[in-house]
Image (spheres, helix red, strand yellow):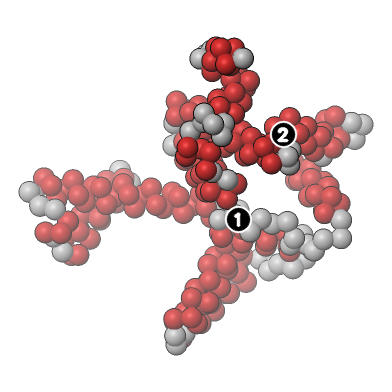
Amino acid sequence: MAQTSDALVHDPDGGLPRLFEIMARLRDPKTGCPWDIEQDFTSIAPYTIEEAYEVADAIDRGAWGELEGELGDLLLQVVYHAQMAAEAGHFTFDAVVRAISDKMVARHPHVFGDASRDKSAEDQTRDWEAAKAAERGRAGTLDGVALGLPALLRAVKLQKRAARLGFDWPSTDEVMDKVVEELDELRSAQDAAHREEEFGDLMFVMANLARHMDIDPEAALRAANAKFTRRFAAIEDALEAKGKRPEDSDLAEMDALWDVAKAAERR
């Protein structure tokens, strides 16, 4: 048996069975990797989130060569969780595949059933959400929005759920007015706890503004992070050309170099 499994582990064309065997071997209590054996759902979950973001990052950068590897890393996370679940008697990888396949068939009657395909993407999105609501049964409108989501993404999802029931600002103008109101409240906050609360309110309204303007706030912030990284690297390069480092400079000089980098990007 060991010889057979060794052959599969080293077979480049082994496909998913090869990956299953590798994971099972890593988790083997007697012969596996000590680090992998010690892991559980909670310890692996942060890696799952990280790998999903690395997939998104590769897509944002158009790094298609990297995307192949990042998707493999994300797939490993699914296999890892399924292996631990099988060990605990919860479910198997096949059950995961069956559940998502059943869900996709049930939620696309216009493709796999007799429902009309004569609907817009917006209509189909409403049908999808209606199907999800029916699956939730009597659960609250906001139930099921995962607590583990990044806070900004979760804010948008919560707002979308409430908006479908009419609990929403009628236009972007009202949301912008609310941004100003929350900013004023942040300015007037008197202690650390109050400032944190008001800052959270401001972030929540900014997420709402992004939704009204059809902007993905996570993507927008990632782009802003990338822009800041590029321009600060340009500052460092310019200082290095002068034989200096950032700690040898001051804000006025670095701000001027920032403006140069900003102008260069707009040419």
Residue 265 position within the rendered picture, expressed as x and y whole percent measured from the top left: 31, 45
The picture quadrant where one finds residue 22 is top right
Q: Amino acid at mark 2?
A: Thr
Q: Nearer the viewer, residue 137 or 238?
A: 137
- Height in image: 141 above or below 87? below
Quickly name the residue at label 2.
92
Q: Is residue 42 left or right of residue 108?
A: left
Residue 58 position within the rendered picture, expressed as x and y whole percent measured from the top left: 46, 36
Q: Nearer the viewer, residue 257 or 108?
A: 108
The quadrant of the image that shows the N terminus is top right
Secondary structure found at label 2: loop
Name the residue furthest left: 243
Residue 215 position within the rendered picture, expressed as x and y whole percent measured from the top left: 56, 53
Asked if disc 1 and disc 2 are in contact, CB closer than 8 Å, the reply is: no
Q: Nearer the viewer, residue 89 or 246?
A: 89
Residue at the (82%, 54%) spot, across then down: 136
> Mark number for residue 168?
none
Residue 60 seen anywhere in this rendered image of the structure: no
Nearer the camera: disc 1 or disc 2: 2
Residue at the (62%, 22%) spot, across then down: 16
